[in-house]
Image (tube, rainbow, N blue to C red):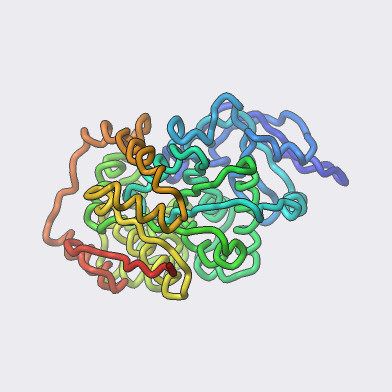
Amino acid sequence: MRKRIRDGEEKTCVAHVEKIHFTSPFSPMVTDQTYFTTHKSFEPASVIEEQNVHLLAVSTDEVVFLRVDTELDIFNIRKNPIFFLVQTMNAKEMITLPRNVYNQMVEQIDISDREVVWLFQTIRCGSTVWAQIFGSLPSFMVISEAQVMYHSIAFHSDIQNFQQFTRTKEYEDMVVSMIKCYINYIPRGKKLFWKTCILDDHMIPIIHKHFPKHKMMFAYRNSLGCAASYERAFGWMPMIKRDCQNVVDTMFEVRPTGAARTMKLFYTNGFDPTMCNKAIRKAMLECSPFEWFIVLWASKVTTVLRCMDQGIDIKPAKYEYLQKDPKQTIREIFRYLGLSSDLLKIACKAMELDSQAGLFFSQQNRAVHAKWQRTKDAVQRCNIVLKSFELPDLDSDFVVLDRVKQ
């Protein structure tokens, strides 16, 4: 339940989160629209500056924050590998703030002295391992998947062509304010490692423009290994299969709505709908998480490659290289970031633990689920998608050339 701000008062509406109603289009992901809440109070807008209050979504008129217990230690990457899961599942209060008040507050934030490393990634590519590595370093804090952009676009807007929206001033302002808001949670003197997620790749040009000193990485893996890992981690879940069916059933709809729209945004990563629709319809994808993940992989890779072609420095970090020679792969990343090689021992030690321990898709839990069933037709459908994006076929090795300026 939400109450409007009282006229003339710069105060927020605070509501108790009573319990969660699991109706999210991508369960077990929770959104602010899946809470049962009761109004608690109006508080000064400064409440959003508290360390246990974090941004969740931005809309045209209002901004949503969630408050968690301070004891949760939400930025502890070893205890909480995925930020948005911990944030939404442990919310005690939901706080809504008028957008204009939020904008005025964020404008005053100065983060010019902060060192930030961004990790863009294809998902299922060792990105959580990288988060654990940097989380083990004494000078770093980690933000691992704050899904502000996805929550905002998927659940607080009706945008169909997200890529078109990313060219607007509204999007640019939204990105800059979100970045400043989150970096402000990090104590001065600490460096930040920010692992991104769905829809975030489109922020690269904005980061390059407004925060040119920030460093960027791209964690990736061959399409076959990535999709197979996704299938085993999530493909067994009934809601994932349901969501795949939603996008299959609406494959030829120009403007899908509801869960179909949400999952289309997810599996295309908000990439060019004309290009994605052409590939999907040509391949005639079936209700297979593996096959739809190939669209997501291709969309993410293409987005990053285009940014690199525009001259933006992004350091590739290939999963297969990290597996084969962890020390050398980490050394190359550290060299790019200007980090001391003395930290290599700490970094390699961090790799010994399951980076997703405690999550429902941890190594231990994934082991009990069936692998992707490879068929000639399924491979052909995936290869049609990859060819549409001018990417190598499913069984080919894929290497992003290192184009960063040394």
Outermost residue toward the top?
Answer: 71
Residue that appears at 52% across and 41% down: 139
Evaluate whether residue 30 shows in this view. no
Q: Is residue 146 above or below residue 89?
A: below
Residue at screen point 74% across, 48% down: 98
- Give the residue at x 22% y 35%: 367
Q: Is residue 136 visible?
A: yes
Residue 303 spot, x, y in % from top left:
42, 67
Q: Nearer the viewer, residue 166 or 201?
A: 201
Looking at the image, residue 398 sits to the left or right of residue 358; the answer is left
Q: Which residue is rendered at x = 40% and y = 42% of the image?
A: 133
Q: Of all residues shown, which one is farthest toward the left? A: 376
Label count reads: 0
Q: Position of residue 259 (x, y in %)?
A: 44, 51
Quadrant where the image shows the C terminus:
bottom left
- Say above or below: 80 vs 277: above
Q: Quadrant of the N terminus?
A: top right
- Give residue 307's quadrant in the image: bottom left
Residue 114 to residue 205: above or below: above
Most foreground residue, 378 or 351: 351
Query: Where's residue 11, x and y in %?
Result: 80, 40
Left or right? Give the position of 379 relative to 248: left
User: Residue 186 in the image: x percent, y percent?
Assistant: 61, 42
